[in-house]
Image: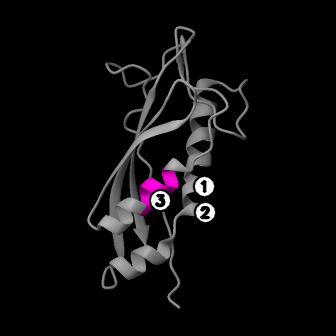
Amino acid sequence: MKYSVFTILLFFTSISLSQDTISVDSQSTYPVYRGCDKDMTNEELKRCSKKKIMNFIKMSFDTGIADVALPLEKSTQFRLDFIINKKGKVEQVNAKANHRAIAIEAIRVTKRLPKFKKPGTKNGEAVDTPFSMLMTIYF
């Protein structure tokens, strides 16, 4: 059996709660992932939520698929885009990878993310929050 080292590089390029700004302003809150405290500052919530999402994906991703799909490669990268809706659920999951099986696995794992305790807000109202990740698997 081949042992795999799995590393994820996350780049949340769309962490804003509005389309024209990059940062979360003082009137906005970041989505609250399970295990993160609602009373944290936005920056702490952002770090906590990213870490929890990353851990969930690392634990759930089947690296054996990458070994089978790309037997001669040492690593593969793929892009994952999704939205946390106004109810705190993940939707509109899309993945781009150099092999279809890896994209399907990334989508499957992302769709299984648990509902967030609280969605992102802007001016006190729940809003859809887009996320974009670039992931790399080393095996």
Residue occupying the point 50% across, 69% down = 6
Measuring 49% from the left and 15% from the top, which residue is drawn there?
25
From the image, tell me which residue sits under label 2.
59
Circle 3 residue: 8
Residue occupying the point 49% across, 29% down: 85
Q: Is residue 36 above or below residue 121?
A: below
- Extreme residue in the bottom direction: 1
Which range of residues does the magenta coloring cover?
A: 105-110
Could you tell me what secondary structure mostly forms the magenta stretch?
A: helix
SS label for mark 3: loop
Give the CA distance from mark 1 to mark 3.
Answer: 9 Å
- Secondary element under disc 1, as helix, strand or loop, is helix
User: Could you tell whether 71 is left or right of 10 in the image?
Assistant: left
Q: Say if 132 sits above or below 62 in the image.
A: above
N-terminal-most mark, 1 or 3: 3
The x, y position of residue 72, in whole percent, is 30, 85
Pointer 2 with pointer 1, Cβ within 8 A? yes
Amino acid tagged 3: Ile
The residue that disc 1 covers is: 55
Quick check: is 5 in the magenta stretch? no
Q: Are marks 1 and 3 in contact (CB under 8 Å)?
A: no
Query: Closest to the observer: 113 or 123?
Result: 113
Mark 2 to mark 3 CA distance (whole Å): 11 Å
Query: Which residue is located at x 42 percent, y 26 percent?
Result: 16
Q: Rate crowding at label 3 as few (under 14), some (14 to 19) or many (20 or more) other CA atoms within 10 Å.
A: some
Instruction: Tell me the element at label 2.
Output: helix
In the rendered image of this protein, does residue 35 appear above or below residue 80?
A: above
* Colouring convention used in this rendered image of the protein: one colour
Q: Quadrant of residue 104?
A: bottom left
61 lies left or right of 132? right
Residue 39, above or below 51:
above
